[in-house]
Amino acid sequence: MADWQPIATAPKDQTIVMIWHEGPKSRGCVIAFCEHPENRDNFQVERWVTGNGSGWHLRPTHWMPLPGPPEASDA
């Protein structure tokens, strides 16, 4: 699996990745994607969004790609 990378190097094209965030009330690892200003109207900053649509208060510091799918089992 890949190592954590600085958030500045994360994809900004809505690719889903794992991020480490440090927020005012929480910190931890979540699956999210970046809504970059170039991909949205009426916003001037990038915003990291989780699967449930939240994310305004995420302050990601690092990211890594998601692992690949599990291998098929013969069971």
Image: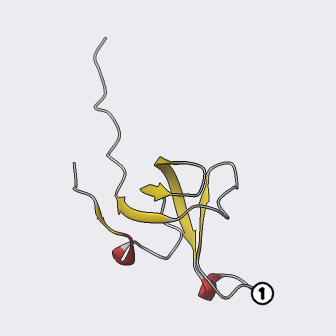
Q: Is residue 3 left or right of residue 38?
A: left
Residue 57 falls in image quadrant: bottom right
Q: Height in image: 15 above or below 3?
A: below
- Residue at the top extreme of this rendering: 75
- Residue matched to label 1: 42
Image coords of residue 46 (percent x, y): 58, 78
Image coords of residue 23 (percent x, y): 55, 58
Q: Nearer the viewer, residue 7 or 22?
A: 22
> Which three-letter amino acid code belongs to the residue tagged 1?
Asn
As helix, strand or loop, the secondary structure at mark 1 comes to loop
Q: Height in image: 8 above or below 17?
A: below
Image coords of residue 43 (percent x, y): 72, 84
Q: Is residue 68 left or right of residue 55?
A: left
Q: Residue at x 48, y 76 (%)?
A: 12
Q: Nearer the viewer, residue 33 or 28?
A: 28
Q: Residue at x 43, y 57 (%)?
A: 19
* Colour scheme of the picture: secondary structure
Residue 8 at least partly seen? yes
Q: Residue at x 29, y 21 (%)?
A: 73
Image coords of residue 49 (percent x, y): 61, 61
Q: Residue at x 38, y 71 (%)?
A: 7
Q: Height in image: 68 above or below 53?
A: above
Residue 20 falls in image quadrant: bottom left
Residue 6 falls in image quadrant: bottom left
Q: Nearer the viewer, residue 26 or 69?
A: 26
Residue 17 at least partly seen? no
Q: Quadrant where the C terminus lies?
A: top left
- Residue at the right extreme of this rendering: 42
